[in-house]
Image (cartoon, rainbow, N blue to C red):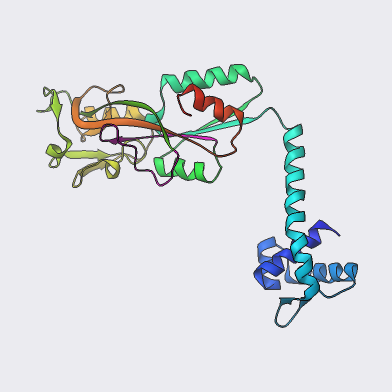
Amino acid sequence: MDPHLLRTFVAVAETGSFSAAAQRLSYTQSAVSQQIAALEADLGTALLTRRPVALTAAGERLRRHATPLLARLAAARADVTRAVAPPGRLIVGLTPLAWSRRVSGALAVIRAESARLNTRVLVADRDRIVAASAGGEIDVALVDGFTAPNDPLPLPVAGAVGVAQDGAVVTVPPDHPLAGRRTLDLADLAEAYWIDAPVVSPLANLPVDGLRAGLRYEGADVAVLRGLVEAGHGLAVLPAGTADGVLLSRLVHRVELLTTPGAGAPATRLSELLGGP
């Protein structure tokens, strides 16, 4: 039996419609009808009734065999592809403030160990990186945020591991009245004007309500955000290791790592180097 015909048969059986199966497979409806007819001619029996579309007894038997057969064929193709493919890939997704010299050093170690490794780095906001990890688009996710000491980040997925924690500071212009303070509580700054930087340091992710944005910065360059603060456009919260500012009490900057299941040895190696499981 032609696996293409089997795949079309399973699509019709699952959708209960020739037109819906055609849409799923990007075929015309007449092509689906012709393929089902060819499969029935090959087996010498009707597999589907037409009005309404339903499986015959023979069709029910074939469906039980077809699904695992197609799965085995897909597994065989993937296995052969892995055998002839380059040594592997490593796609790292991270938020801008999750990047550090430690991450750069770990990537250098892995690339030195496998010179032919196909390596990519994707930088985006936290929601985008978490979604890319859940969908298998990337192999390792490094995401950051500000939270209470020892609290995990409020991520929509399980399995994140903390790999770094630092103090948090509110960055202010040099001539700002708060510039001389040693510590502040974020709740005390509700009346200040802020820079909302949804990719770098989004106000929505800070554990306090009511902060007012005077300017929105949609880029991912931390240096640009610092420059906007220095020019007096508003305040921003950044990790203590990346900017000067007033230390925030009861708040830390935390970086967490997510590894996509089945991502491969390079992803596991990066997790080990960064302190993951």
Magenta region, residue range: 139-159
Res 60 quadrant in image: bottom right
* Residue 205, percent from left and from top: 30, 42
Picture quarter containing residue 54?
Answer: bottom right
Q: Is residue 199 above or below residue 105?
A: below
Instruction: Give the side of residue 262 with respect to residue 167, left or right.
Output: right
Q: Is residue 35 left or right of residue 105?
A: right
The residue located at (66%, 23%) in the rendering is 116
Q: Main secondary structure of the magenta part?
A: loop
Question: Residue 190: x, y in percent?
Answer: 14, 42
User: Measured from the top left, where is residue 186 in percent x and y?
Assistant: 17, 36
Q: What residue do we see at 21% from left, 43% from top?
A: 208
**217 sits left or right of 262 in the view:** left
Question: Closer to the camera, 222 or 115?
Answer: 115
Q: Residue at (19%, 44%) from the top-left corner?
A: 211
Q: Nearer the viewer, residue 189 or 216?
A: 189
Considering every residue shown, the one lying at the far bottom of the view is 51
Residue at image location 81% in from the left, 67% down from the top = 35
Task: Confirm whether residue 172 shows in the render.
Answer: no
Work out whether residue 98 can be spotted: yes
Task: From the top left corner, tell me how far across and down residue 264 is, in percent.
Answer: 61, 32
The image quadrant where one finds the N terminus is bottom right
Would residue 107 be counted in the magenta stretch?
A: no
22 vs 260: above or below: below
